[in-house]
Image: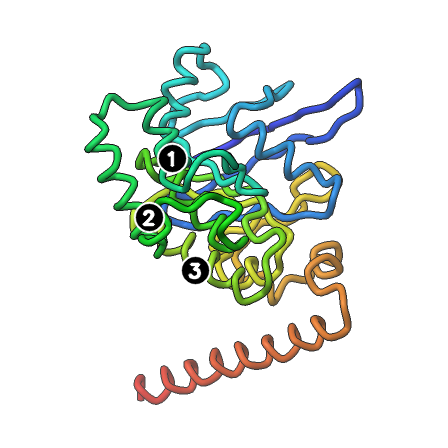
Amino acid sequence: MISITNIEKGFSGKPVIEGVSAEFETGKCNLIIGASGSGKTVLMKCLVGLITPNQGQIYYDGESFTSMNDDQKKIMRRKIGMLFQGSALFDSMTVEQNIMFPLDMFSNKTRGEKLKRVAEVLDRVNLSEAHKKFPAEISGGMKKRVGIARAIVLNPQYLFCDEPNSGLDPQTSLVIDKLIREITTEFNITTVINTHDMNSVMEIGDRILYMFQGKKEWEGTNKEIIFSKNEKLNSFIFASEFLQDAKDMRMLEMKGKIDNNRDMDDLLSR
């Protein structure tokens, strides 16, 4: 679990994040959402140590990340995997070499052991035939899967994903969402996802933190979001008339299920 308390960050005297506290649970997909300029990207950068908050604490399973020295932070970062928005693959390296890069940097494994581990993670993301291909030779969705494979090659305890569906078509986005969810639960990882993709919110949003103008405006699950009466959240999530109608239909559907369950409970109690 990652927990943050009263995180504040500003630049040139202008506040960007103001007093944000939250928990990101292990084995679940924790989403940070919000409009451009809401502070969600800065918050994620604080979480991984790219930016130091002006105030507040960040805890990784009870250990204060903000209080660690540089050497301690380096050790902690070896437990962190990162999927970048544009995949951030090295164009001059093959898929195999890209995934092996963290192993070359942070492990003492033999070359044979590294190749075996690369094969394992490529197989896990269904790219076992892509070892010798270069990034220019694979699709955007495949690049994202290579990025995921590289992010998990060191068996991280924490996984950060920055806009994992950026630039992908809706069908491919669903594939990436499903893969991230499977890896999260399979390896019991604390996964934090920065996204503006509403499909991701509804499909894999185990825990959702909605940021508005640098503050935590709402927190809950993808099921609770349907019934939320927070006007700022609703105008962000269900911006169009079509999505508002979809929300209303989903509310009726879920209410019907609740009523049916109550009727069943009444029958069983007689």
Name the residue that disc number 2 marks.
122
Residue under the image location 70 percent in, 77 percent down:
245
Query: Which mark, residue 178?
Result: 3
Residue type, mark 2 in image: Leu
| Circles 2 and 3: CB atoms closer than 8 Å | no
Residue type, mark 1 in image: Gln
Classify residue 9 by image quadrant.
top right
* Residue situated in front as seen by the camera: 60 or 155: 155
Residue under the image location 28 percent in, 23 percent down:
107
* Residue 129 drawn at (x, y percent): 33, 54
Q: Is residue 236 above or below residue 213?
A: below
Q: Earlier in the sequence, mark 3 or mark 1?
A: 1
Residue type, mark 3 in image: Lys
Query: How dense is the environment of label 2, judged by Cα within 10 Å: few (below 14), some, or many (20 and up)?
Result: many
* Residue 226 drawn at (x, y percent): 60, 66
| Circles 3 and 1: CB atoms closer than 8 Å | no
